[in-house]
Amino acid sequence: MDLSKLSNGDKVIAGSGIALFIFSFFPWFTIDAAFIDYSESGWDYFFTGIIPTLLGVALVAYVVVTKLNDNVKLPELPVAWPLVVLGAGALAGILVLLRLLIGGDDSGTGVLDRSIGLFLATLAAIALAFGSFLKFKEEGGELPTKGGGTPGTGTGSTPPTPF
């Protein structure tokens, strides 16, 4: 296993994806009352906990498969792989950040307090989004142009027809 093949974006994705997975098990919300000891982790929230964690694991798997194994050929997609990596990392970051801003599911009572696991998971998810952006730029990724033409060439749209 040659770790020198990993770029900076790969290292950030791998580290933050693993950290997001670990922090998903930490308490995200707690009730700190006299006789109540209750907490919720990231696995108690599907769209803003489980989905970002699985996206982080998938991005770590992508880095491992593409960089540490030379015999793998990824399938062709309608969009480039760097754009898929960027989208997955950004989505994971946005979803965890939304959970931080929205708070816990306490039916409006305000008894669930944000805990350290949520803050650490948010930092890991933002780092995952940043790592996916680094990877996108390192691989020369460009956003698709309107009309499906080659980026920067001005092609992809047909001129208007005169009437």
Image (cartoon, rainbow, N blue to C red):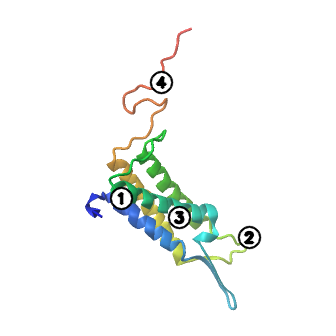
Q: Is residue 163 above or below residue 93?
A: above
Q: Earlier in the sequence, mark 4 or mark 1?
A: 1
Q: Which residue is mark 3?
A: 53
Nearer the camera: disc 2 or disc 1: 1
- Are dots 3 and 4 in contact, CB under 8 Å? no
Viewer-side label of 2, 4: 4
- Amino acid type of disc 4? Ser
Quadrant (top left, top right, bottom left, bottom right) of the C terminus: top right
* Alpha-carbon span between mark 2 and mark 1: 40 Å
| Amino acid type, residue under disc 2 in the picture | Ser
Which amino acid lies under the numbered mark 3 shown in the image of this protein? Thr
Determine the secondary structure under disc 1: helix
Residue annotated with mark 2: 107
Within-10-Å neighbours for mark 3: few <14, some 14–19, many 20+: many
Q: Earlier in the sequence, mark 2 or mark 4?
A: 2
- In three-dimensional space, the C-alpha distance between marks 3 and 1, rounded to whole angstroms, equals 17 Å
